[in-house]
Image: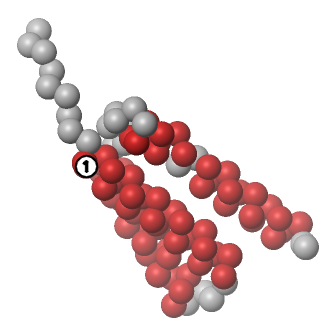
């Protein structure tokens, strides 16, 4: 396996692992942990990249990585929106 492909895979794995703490905050601790607008923008960008990977650049590894990123962003947005905000006590 070429070093470039290994680096590509390792970077992709690191980026995907980066979603795990946010999923833990949302699912385990039921804590709204994302800036929704940022994730909407990242989701749009990842959606476009995912589309690009299937339509223009037929690279299986790139398709897998871009699909995981897109689905992660969408999942985080959905999970975050399902968490009810705690009522704040009056100061």
Residue 90 % position (x, y): 8, 13
Residue 44 % position (x, y): 37, 67
Residue plotted at (39% across, 58% down): 75
Query: Does residue 1 sit above or below 51 in this rendering?
Result: above
User: 27 or 18: nearer the eye?
Assistant: 27
Q: Is residue 85 left or right of residue 23?
A: left
Q: How many numbered discs? A: 1
Tell me the quadrant of the picture where the C terminus can be found: top left
SS under mark 1 = helix
Colouring of the image: secondary structure
Q: Residue furthest front?
A: 28
Q: Is residue 4 left or right of residue 21?
A: right
Q: Is residue 39 visible?
A: no
Tell me the quadrant of the picture where the N terminus can be found: bottom right
Quadrant assignment, res 73? bottom left
Query: Does residue 14 sit above or below 5 in this rendering?
Result: above
């Amino acid at each position: 396996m070429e070093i470039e492909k290994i680096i590509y895979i390792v970077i992709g794995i690191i980026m995907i692992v980066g979603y795990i703490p946010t999923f833990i905050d949302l699912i385990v601790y039921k804590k709204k942990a994302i800036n929704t607008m940022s994730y909407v923008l990242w989701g749009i960008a990842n959606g476009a990249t995912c589309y690009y990977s299937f339509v223009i650049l037929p690279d299986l590894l790139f398709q897998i990585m871009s699909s995981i990123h897109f689905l992660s962003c969408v999942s985080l947005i959905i999970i975050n929106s399902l968490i009810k905000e705690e009522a704040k006590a009056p100061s």
